[in-house]
């Protein structure tokens, strides 16, 4: 009986010590910090659903994957921002409209659609915005006296292959992030 008790004790001690030792081998910690406001900026009436008319270009300008052409800028204004909001940016959502390979907006036109061409989102300086990576979109100041701000972004044609002539419609959804 004593041998069985000692054996059981040794086995139990090893079982308890092993997980404790293993748990300390690669210990890490993640701390989340954030801020919740009771009020946010409003998107200016007329800017919540923008229609951007892209320039007409020749298909041969998009004759290879990755080529871009025909950039067109647009603005989104915000107003009624709380006093603590100093900067704003659009955070473009990575929804079903986004090509997961290129990070561009798919052509959803159903009739007469151009082939092998999407829309790539860009900042006002032509740097690329990747939907889902809100840091890729530039921040814009909020006027502390007027409590308004204007964000400027753009879209450009993006070849996913050799483009063909046709029409293009792409849609993206965005949220307004505050800093």
Image: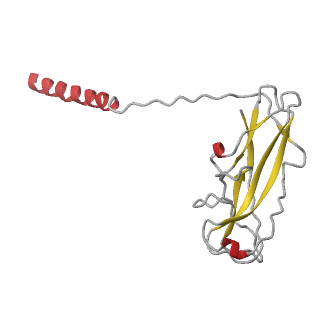
Query: Which residue is pictured at 61% across the width and 72% down the height?
Result: 64
- 84 sits left or right of 106 in the view: right
Q: Which quarter of the image is occupied by the N terminus?
A: top left
Q: Nearer the viewer, residue 165 or 68?
A: 68
Q: Residue 155, position in %: x, y?
A: 74, 58
The furthest residue to the top: 2
Query: Which residue is pictured at 64% across the width and 66% down the height?
Result: 67
Q: Which quarter of the image is occupied by the C terminus?
A: top right
Q: Residue 118, position in %: x, y?
A: 69, 65
Q: Residue 26, position in %: x, y?
A: 36, 33
Q: Nearer the viewer, residue 157 or 40?
A: 157
Is the residue 35 above or below the residue 97 in the image? above
Is the residue 170 above or below the residue 146 in the image? below
- 63 sits left or right of 70 in the view: left
Q: Nearer the viewer, residue 106 or 153?
A: 153
Q: Quadrant of residue 27?
A: top left
Q: Quadrant of residue 77?
A: top right
Is the residue 13 above or below the residue 53 in the image? above
Query: Which residue is pictured at 68% across the width and 28% down the height?
Result: 35
Q: Residue 28, position in %: x, y?
A: 42, 31
């Amino acid at each position: 009986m004593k041998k069985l008790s000692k054996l059981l004790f040794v086995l139990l001690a090893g079982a308890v010590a092993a997980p404790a030792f293993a748990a300390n081998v690669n210990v890490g910690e993640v701390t989340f910090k954030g801020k919740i406001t009771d009020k946010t900026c409003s998107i200016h009436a007329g800017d919540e659903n923008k229609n951007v008319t892209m320039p007409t270009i020749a298909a041969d300008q998009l004759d290879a994957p990755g080529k871009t052409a025909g950039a067109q800028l647009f603005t989104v204004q915000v107003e009624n921002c709380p006093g603590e909001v100093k900067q704003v940016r659009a955070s473009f959502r990575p929804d079903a409209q986004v090509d997961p390979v290129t990070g561009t907006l798919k052509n959803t036109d159903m009739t007469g659609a151009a082939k092998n061409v999407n829309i790539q989102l860009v900042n006002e300086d032509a740097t690329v915005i990747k939907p889902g990576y809100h840091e890729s979109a530039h921040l814009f100041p909020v006027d502390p006296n007027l409590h308004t701000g204007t964000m400027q972004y753009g879209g450009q044609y993006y070849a996913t292959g050799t483009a063909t002539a046709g029409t293009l419609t792409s849609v993206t959804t965005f949220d307004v992030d505050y800093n």
